[in-house]
Image (cartoon, rainbow, N blue to C red):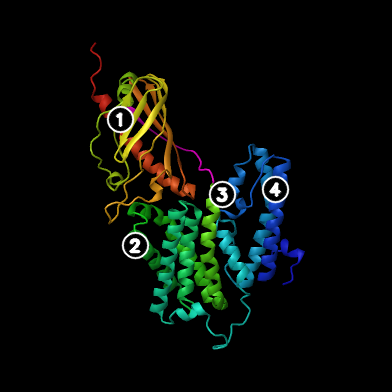
Amino acid sequence: MKPKLSDLWRWDGEVDRGAYLFWGLLLTAIKFNLDRIVFRVWFDTDIHVLNYFSATGPAAIVTLLESRAQQLVLLAMALPFLWTGVVLSLRRLRSLKWPLWMVVMFVVPLLKWFFFVALSILPRAVEPPPLPGHRAPRWFERLVPRSMLGSAVMGVAVSTALAIGATALGAGALRQYGWGLFVGVPFVMGLASVLVHGMRERRNLAECMLVAVLAAFIASVGLLAVAFEGIICLVMAAPLAAVLVLFGAMVGYVIQAGSWRRESGRVMCAAVLAVPVVLGVEKLEQPLAPLLEVTSAVEVNAPPERVWEHVVTFSELPPPTEFLFRAGVAYPMRAEIHGRGVGAVRHCVFSTGPFVEPIEVWDEPRLLKFAVTQNPAPMQEWTPYRNIHPPHLDGFLASSGGQFRLEPLPGGRTRLEGTTWYRHHMWPVGYWQAWSDFIIHRIHLRVLNHVKRLAEETPGPAH
């Protein structure tokens, strides 16, 4: 290991694993202490080392800053470290003869730490592989069959055990649905299944991808069989998980196809052991879920005064026809109200229970705004068992408030707009927001179209 200062800015050439690990640890320590001093002296804010080792670390640090100027200072401080990290990773990839595009993993939340570990462990690709019989197989290698079928079964078994164990720890014990569970676990599943499959004999890309897909499928069946999750949650997580499983499989293929195959056991163990560490760090950090907003609208052929009557309270809705609601997602059934004006309590009854909604603004017939003090379960999971209740049904998707806004339109018509503010404590936020926004929008339209139908069917005053 011969670290040189020029390692920090040179694009050309290679860097060995010792120098890469040295610079990575040193630069991380320097950046943390520099940020800590600046945040304390200039911003009067404290940061924690866990902010740097969790998936939401950068975002969590940015939320501590109140102004755009402070955020720009943070960005300016981070750019030199980002530059050196990319330069070092590119040179390390070149020494491993890996595709240079894999440097994107350096900026992907959570995966960057698995990437760093792999690049710090694997030797140069030019190092000659040991002669046949030169090194006795390590204890784990001896457990892996040489046959293609046997090693595939072993790879699937390891990945399935990882998925079930990580879900039991993260969702069950820690009650945490974060990056570690939805990003780290699928990636490591794909990586581990391929590394095990190719530990004794090199496998081609098609075989590796097939083993990874089978591992993901069997793991899903296993989670369903042990009643950890229902079908709806597994289906919703599937697109993200599939991409990450295949990405992990591709990285595993590159490792086992090269001269680093003898190191694949170490890489796999490091990746598998990193999963509970990441889950634990996320639990300690407990990032604040952002407040999200969904707004939907319809136009009603009736004046606001008539529409208002059916917004405040409405009769029983017909049974749903949408597959989404028939599959188990909670849907609205009726609305009741106790009292009039600010302080009245509205109950919007869903298929899984009532939302309790104290009225905060009563501006008849323009605006009805309310808080939400009680949320029912967001869905009834499909399961082969009589009933399961995974932790994500308790408070991980919770509405904090809502409103109905009525705007008069020409010709005695009304624009009826419904808005919901909510939080969901599941990461990555953007991925799960796509699902939750879609579901809430469909709930809005079910209510708004029902109110529209009632208002248009109600006869107006005689002239």
Query: Which residue matches tag 3?
Result: 285
Query: What is the x, y in percent for residue 61?
Result: 61, 46
Residue at image position (53%, 52%) is: 282
CB contact under 8 Å: marks 3 and 1? no
Q: Which residue is mark 2?
A: 221
Name the N-terminal-most of marks 3 and 2. 2
Viewer-nearest residue: 388 or 414: 388
At label 2, counting other C-alpha atoms closer than 10 Å, the crowd grade (few under 14, some 14-19, many 20 or more) is some
Q: Residues within 10 Å of mark 4 (few under 14, many from 20)?
A: some
> Which residue is labeled 4 in the image?
36
Name the quarter where the N terminus is drawn. bottom right
Mark 2 or mark 4, which is nearer the start of the sequence? 4
Q: Are marks 4 and 2 in contact (CB under 8 Å)?
A: no
Q: Are marks 2 and 1 in contact (CB under 8 Å)?
A: no
Callout 1: SS: strand
Toward the right, the furthest residue is 5
Q: CA distance from mark 3 to mark 2?
A: 31 Å
What is the magenta segment's predominant secondary structure?
Answer: strand
Helix, strand or loop at label 2? It is: helix
Which quarter of the rendered picture does the C terminus lie within?
top left
The quarter of the displayed image where residue 136 is located? bottom right
Residue 343 showing in the rendered view: yes
Q: CA distance from mark 3 to mark 1?
A: 39 Å
Camera-side residue of 39 and 407: 39
Say if residue 9 shows up in the picture. no
Identify which amino acid the numbered label 2 is placed on: Val
